[in-house]
């Protein structure tokens, strides 16, 4: 389902920014899309850290088979308590590193204990929710920002440390030359309060196929 703000954001960005106007025309009919529940989305993000997409998919399938009653569903919803109850040996047997197994158990504990409670997130601004998420072992700011964009569909997230965004900014706005952090932040000011949408279209200029988390 398209985020309710998407068409308004695309229209505003097209009026403010010639680069984005061109990209928005080039990629009609596609948009940010939520795929799964909060716990499953974060667990999958942890599994996929610092490995190839192919390796992550293989490990994820084995992980789901261990912790889920119906592992063959396309997008299974995982129960935090099922992950928390698993022995480290069983998680390692899925192909997870010792550290990632620890991260997944810590994530499950945060959800099972209520330290991460999605019912409360609507009351939190972006920075407060990022702070809550990075309390989980293995969830850094970039992972939290991706979660806010792709799962929570927050409209004004700017993942300034994302290498793809940095590459798109220097390609489209600075003749391929590197931009420092203050320059990137200043450039993105014109996109408020739709920086998630601007970032998403800039990513499309590098990879037309949308990523889903």
Image: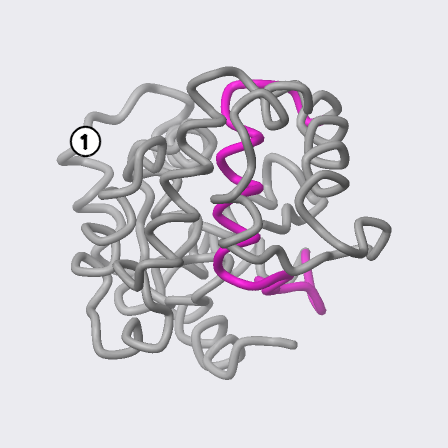
Q: Position of residue 41 (x, y in %)?
A: 54, 52
Pick out the residue farthest to the right.
Answer: 72
Write down the quadrant of residue 75 in the picture: bottom right
Q: Is residue 51 magenta?
A: yes
Q: Position of residue 148 (x, y in %)?
A: 39, 58
Drawn side of residue 210 relative to residue 85, left or right = right
Q: Position of residue 173 (x, y in %)?
A: 37, 37
Give the residue at mark 1: 181
Q: Which residues lie in the magenta part?
A: 27-53
Q: Image height check: is 166 above or below 178? A: below
Residue at the (26%, 59%) spot, across then down? 115
Drawn side of residue 156 relative to residue 135, left or right = right
The residue nearer to you, when weighing 183 against 173, is 183
Residue at the (72%, 57%) spot, across then down? 76
On the rendered image, what quadrant is the N terminus found in?
bottom right
Write down the quadrant of residue 31 in the picture: bottom right
Task: Judge the density around disc 1: few (<14), some (14-19), many (≥20) Cα neighbours within 10 Å.
Answer: few
Q: Is residue 25 magenta?
A: no
Specify how the rendered protein is coloured: one colour
Q: Position of residue 111 (x, y in %)?
A: 38, 57
The residue nearer to you, when weighing 189 against 40, is 40
Q: Image height check: is 132 above or below 185? A: below
Q: Image height check: is 91 above or below 74? A: above
Residue at the (71%, 39%) spot, across then down? 66
Residue at the (39%, 36%) spot, across then down? 169
Q: How many marks?
A: 1
Numbered disc 1: secondary structure: helix
């Amino acid at each position: 389902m398209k985020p309710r703000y998407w068409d308004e954001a695309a229209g505003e960005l097209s009026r403010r920014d010639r680069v984005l106007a061109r990209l928005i025309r080039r990629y009609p009919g596609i948009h940010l899309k939520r795929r799964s529940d909060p716990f499953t989305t974060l667990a999958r993000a942890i599994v996929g850290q610092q490995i190839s997409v192919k390796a992550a998919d293989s490990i994820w399938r084995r992980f789901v088979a261990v912790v889920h009653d119906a592992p063959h569903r396309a997008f299974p919803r995982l129960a935090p308590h099922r992950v928390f109850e698993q022995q480290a040996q069983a998680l390692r047997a899925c192909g997870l590193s010792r550290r990632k197994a620890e991260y997944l158990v810590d994530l499950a504990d945060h959800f099972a204990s209520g330290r991460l409670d999605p019912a409360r997130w609507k009351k939190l601004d972006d920075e407060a929710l990022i702070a809550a998420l990075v309390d989980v072992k293995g969830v850094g700011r970039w992972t939290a920002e991706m979660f806010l964009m792709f799962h929570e569909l927050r409209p004004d997230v700017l993942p300034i440390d994302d290498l793809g965004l940095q590459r798109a900014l220097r390609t489209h706005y600075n003749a391929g030359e590197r931009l420092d952090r203050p320059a990137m932040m200043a450039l993105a000011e014109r996109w408020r309060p739709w920086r998630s949408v601007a970032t998403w279209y800039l990513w499309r200029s590098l990879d037309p196929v949308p990523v889903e988390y």
